[in-house]
Image (tube, helix red, strand yellow):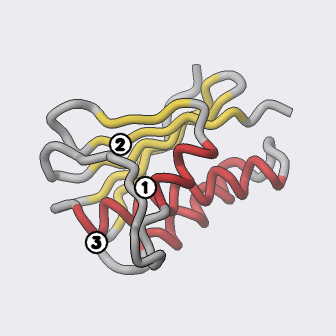
Amino acid sequence: MPRPIEVPLPRERSCAAIARRLVERHFSYELDAHAIENLKLVATELVDNAYLHGEGEIQLRLQKLGPCVRVEVIDEGQDAEIRVRPNPTGVGGHGLQLVQRLASAWGAREGTAHVWAELWVAR
């Protein structure tokens, strides 16, 4: 199993854009464009949630696991809340719904701010 790619991200508004570029750089040589776009969307949503709702340093971890890629986002907060809930205003709040739709599995490690998603990327 290949070692994960682990990258600290700045706690700045640009952190999600940095995550997208990292996904593109590390997987463009082996995945098709559709898989890359889905990975970028999921990484963006998880990183953006860490930026908006988390604390401390944000860490992005990417790992190819056979036919899947695992995206993990860790910050220094506690008890990540991963409830998918509709936003009655229709503005924002769709990120975890998107993750739920695209990922084959996803969740958070209990008691931590460590959220993960696995996406099927096999051709």
Residue at 49% over, 63% down:
94
**Category of crowding for the residue at label 1, using alpha-carbon neighbours closer than 10 angstroms: few (below 14), some (14–19), many (at least 20):** many
Q: Quick one: 45 or 96, which is closer to the camera? A: 96
Rendered location of residue 86, percent (x, y): 42, 60
Kindly state the secondary structure of the residue where label 2 is placed. strand
Q: Can you identify the residue that label 2 sits on?
A: 115
Residue at 72% over, 53% down:
36
Rendered location of residue 62, percent (x, y): 52, 42
Disc with the residue nearer the chain's start (2 vs 3):
3
Q: Do the residues labelled 2 and 3 touch (CB within 8 Å)?
A: no
Amino acid identity at mark 2: Val
Q: Can you identify the residue that label 3 sits on?
A: 11
Q: Quick one: 41 or 83, which is closer to the camera? A: 83
Single out the mark in the foreground, 3 or 1: 1
Single out the mark in the foreground, 2 or 3: 2
Q: Are marks 1 and 2 in contact (CB under 8 Å)?
A: yes
Disc with the residue nearer the chain's start (3 vs 1):
3
Horizontal placement of 34 versus 25: left or right? Answer: right
Kindly state the secondary structure of the residue where label 1 is placed. helix
Residue at 40% over, 67% down:
87
Q: Which mark is residue 46?
A: 1
Q: Quick one: 47 or 99, which is closer to the camera? A: 99
- Mark 1 and mark 2: span between their CA atoms? 7 Å
**Category of crowding for the residue at label 2, using alpha-carbon neighbours closer than 10 angstroms: few (below 14), some (14–19), many (at least 20):** many
Amino acid identity at mark 3: Arg
Disc with the residue nearer the chain's start (1 vs 2):
1
**Category of crowding for the residue at label 3, using alpha-carbon neighbours closer than 10 angstroms: few (below 14), some (14–19), many (at least 20):** many
